[in-house]
């Protein structure tokens, strides 16, 4: 059992790798445009995807905590593979909506469960040190971002050959998730010894928002700072086209963005330990501001390079904020809590995504990016500064 649980860690890393191995993503905007969609339609599709996750996110996390994380991963992997197989036959808006709903359901089942399994596996192996949990989250983020980068390189090359071949390769990669999910061993827990019991959603919410000011502010910051770097990901491909970048470069550029996320995730804790949590949070809050305005005002390759700052922020968010939250959450409802932050992120995108798409379609990319820059300033003032103040409040007694 002990040996199999050690294997669990590598299997979870592998699952995260293939779940993030998206050969279609670096050229997805041209792919959808080739099917007759406008930029506003594409943002609408992503809002449909987000709605599917909002509907299933919290129930899926609850399902994982009550009936087992492996069960959630296996079911999610089946739907994930089936969804990308169906994409081979989706050629108009209605069928693409069905595709988005299916992969949204899959994403809701897969999100949170892998991270909860990783924490619980380490806990069972008596790997209790915070440094080890931090390293595990950092590694998980590194594998996800590296996979995105490698998938981008392959996707860019396949797109030059054939969009159809690219989708077939994506389908094959999606089914790898099921093979790895079947290899996972569910760590023993107090719940498994006492029998299945109900997790009280009210108790989870009270813990997240009332038990600890730092935890409350982190739970608010995670989805909103994820959103701050998510809108621009859908604007980068039309931005590259506007700068005269050929489709052949899209895979390499997306790879570069993914590598920046991976490096930031890999060294996020190094930055936090060396410069302290306050400096790390200030950096995380300033990067989206500089990134959005930099892309809007700069031109050509200069704007593209400045845009990488947004992806550095994403990498820091994935490890520093996520670890800060998970260290303050009991194992019994860790998957529910992680799914809840994803739920908040998707809910925010449902409200903002179609507006950003419409704004980009009617007013242009520069205006849209300036608006996003202004929202990043508001985010720093109303979200990051309260988080920094709550961290300072717990540091003062320690210093004393």
Image (tube, helix red, strand yellow):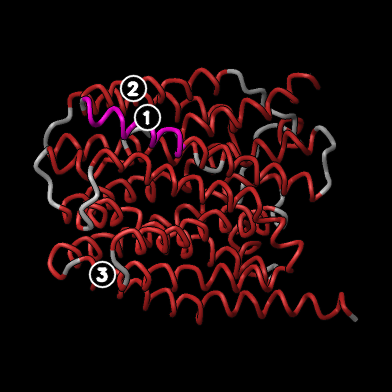
Badge 3 marks a residue whose secondary structure is helix
Residue at horizontal 65 percent and vertical 56 percent from the top: 268
Task: Please tell me whether residue 347 is drawn above or below residue 68 in the rendered image.
Answer: below
Badge 2 marks a residue whose secondary structure is helix
Instruction: State if disc 1 and disc 2 touch (CB < 8 Å).
Output: yes
Q: In x, y percent, where is residue 380?
A: 50, 77
Residue that badge 1 annotates: 154
Residue that badge 2 annotates: 169
Q: Residue furthest front?
A: 301
- On the rendered structure, is 120 left or right of 322? right
Which dot marks residue 288?
Answer: none
Residue at horizontal 53 percent and vertical 72 percent from the top: 285
Q: Residue furthest left?
A: 36
Task: Please tell me whether residue 144 is drawn above or below residue 79 in the rendered image.
Answer: below
Q: Quarter holding the N terminus? A: top right
Work out how far the residue at label 2 is from the one at label 1, CA to CA, in angstroms. 10 Å
Badge 1 marks a residue whose secondary structure is helix
């Amino acid at each position: 059992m002990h040996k199999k649980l050690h294997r669990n860690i590598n299997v979870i890393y592998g699952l995260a790798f293939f779940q993030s191995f998206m050969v279609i993503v670096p050229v997805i905007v041209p792919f959808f445009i080739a099917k007759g969609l406008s930029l506003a339609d594409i943002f609408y599709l992503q809002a449909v995807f987000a709605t599917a996750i909002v509907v299933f996110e919290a129930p899926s996390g609850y399902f994982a905590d009550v009936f087992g994380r492996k069960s959630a991963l296996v079911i999610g992997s089946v739907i994930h593979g089936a969804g990308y197989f169906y994409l081979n036959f989706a050629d108009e808006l209605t069928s693409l909506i069905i595709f988005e709903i299916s992969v949204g359901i899959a994403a809701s089942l897969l999100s949170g469960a892998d991270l909860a399994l990783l924490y619980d596996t380490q806990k069972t192996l008596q790997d209790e040190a915070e440094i080890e949990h931090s390293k595990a989250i950092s590694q998980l983020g590194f594998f996800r971002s590296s996979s995105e980068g490698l998938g981008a390189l392959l996707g860019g090359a396949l797109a030059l050959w054939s969009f159809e071949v690219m989708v077939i390769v994506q389908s094959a990669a999606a089914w790898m998730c099921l093979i790895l999910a079947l290899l996972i061993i569910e760590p023993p827990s107090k719940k498994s010894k006492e029998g299945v019991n109900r997790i009280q959603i009210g108790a989870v919410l009270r813990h997240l928002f009332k038990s600890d000011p730092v935890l409350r502010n982190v739970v608010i910051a995670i989805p909103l700072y994820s959103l701050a770097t998510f809108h621009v990901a859908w604007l980068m491909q039309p931005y590259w086209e506007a700068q005269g970048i050929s489709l052949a470069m899209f895979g390499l550029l997306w790879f570069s963005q993914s590598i920046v996320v991976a490096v930031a995730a890999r060294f996020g804790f190094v930055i936090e330990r060396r410069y302290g949590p306050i400096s790390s949070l200030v950096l995380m809050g300033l990067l989206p501001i500089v990134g959005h305005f930099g892309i809007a005002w700069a031109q050509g390759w200069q704007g593209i390079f400045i845009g990488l700052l947004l992806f550095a922020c994403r990498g820091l968010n994935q490890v520093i904020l996520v670890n800060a939250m998970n260290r303050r959450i009991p194992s019994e409802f860790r998957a529910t809590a992680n799914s809840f932050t994803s739920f908040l992120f998707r809910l925010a995108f449902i409200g903002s995504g179609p507006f950003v798409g419409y704004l980009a379609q009617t007013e242009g990319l520069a205006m849209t990016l300036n608006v996003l820059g202004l929202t990043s300033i508001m985010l720093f003032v109303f979200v990051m500064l309260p988080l920094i103040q709550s961290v300072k409040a717990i540091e003062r007694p320690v210093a004393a």
